[in-house]
Image (spheres, rainbow, N blue to C red):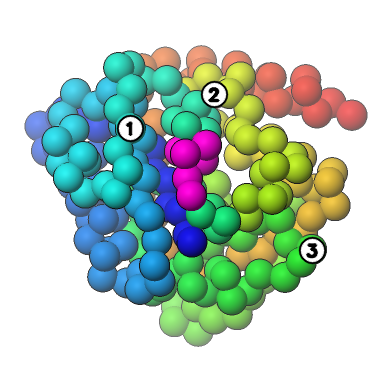
Amino acid sequence: MISIIVPCYLLPDKDAELLTFTQNFIKSLREHVKVCYEFIIVDNGSPIGGEYLREQADVYVRNPTNLGFAPAVNQGLKIARGDWLIVSNNDIEFLHDWPHAAISAWVDDVGAISSHLHDSDPEHRAGIELAPEGHMFGALWMTRREVLDEIGLLDEGYERGMFEDRDLWRRLSIAGYKFRKVGWVNHIGNATWGKLPHQQKIYLANKARFEEHWSE
């Protein structure tokens, strides 16, 4: 079983961008991903689009307020039934059956697999690249249940978002796991983060927390 966990916090604006990005993500998921999966949406109290998210999900969790990225992802991971666990942002678009490609690339010493960002040059869209620690793509990644059972879930001490993925990669690396990148996706980038207040303050606080924790 594959579980795909997507945290969402849809904010209103004149163009409803976040809702549109999410609709595009789900459309690409339905179109390209052919493997059997359960689709888990954790809604962090979105002011808009809640009913749409509920209708699209196999499992829908709604929080009364925005708990942040790591708590929402962890909620999804805890209730997921899959042995294969995929965490995705809602501002990506699948270009092919990425879960199938990621599972096919898995070997025993790998702890997580992420995706390449879309490149306009088609010659760059093939192959598997061993990724150095710290260079994983945090907006889409896959691991296995037993890996997280060993090293733990995302650290919820990072406020809202940013650096919880790097913290996870560091723990995986210390545990002796390697990383891979496989396949391609489109990614808007900072779609939700860019609409949150006090981004710079949060970023700097999370960065300081990460550096203090991993100073050695």
Residue at 50% of width from left, 78% of height from top?
Answer: 125
Q: Secondary structure at mark 1?
A: strand
Q: Secondary structure at mark 2?
A: helix
Can residue 79 be found in the magenta stretch? yes
Q: Which residue, given by chain and number where applicable, does mark 2 sit on?
A: 203
Tell me the kind of residue under disc 3: Asp
Q: Is residue 194 above or below residue 140?
A: above
Q: From mark 2 to mark 3, how far is it between C-alphas?
A: 32 Å
Can residue 60 be found in the magenta stretch? no
Q: Quadrant of residue 151?
A: top right
Q: Which residue, given by chain and number where applicable, does mark 3 sit on?
A: 109
Q: Position of residue 19 (x, y in %)?
A: 19, 41
Q: Nearer the viewer, mark 1 or mark 2?
A: 1
**Nearest to the observer: residue 147 or residue 130:** 147
Residue at 63% of width from left, 55% of height from top?
Answer: 144
**Nearest to the observer: residue 166 or residue 34:** 34
Q: Which residues are magenta?
A: 76-81
137 left or right of 129 in image? left
Q: Which residue, given by chain and number where applicable, does mark 1 sit on?
A: 61
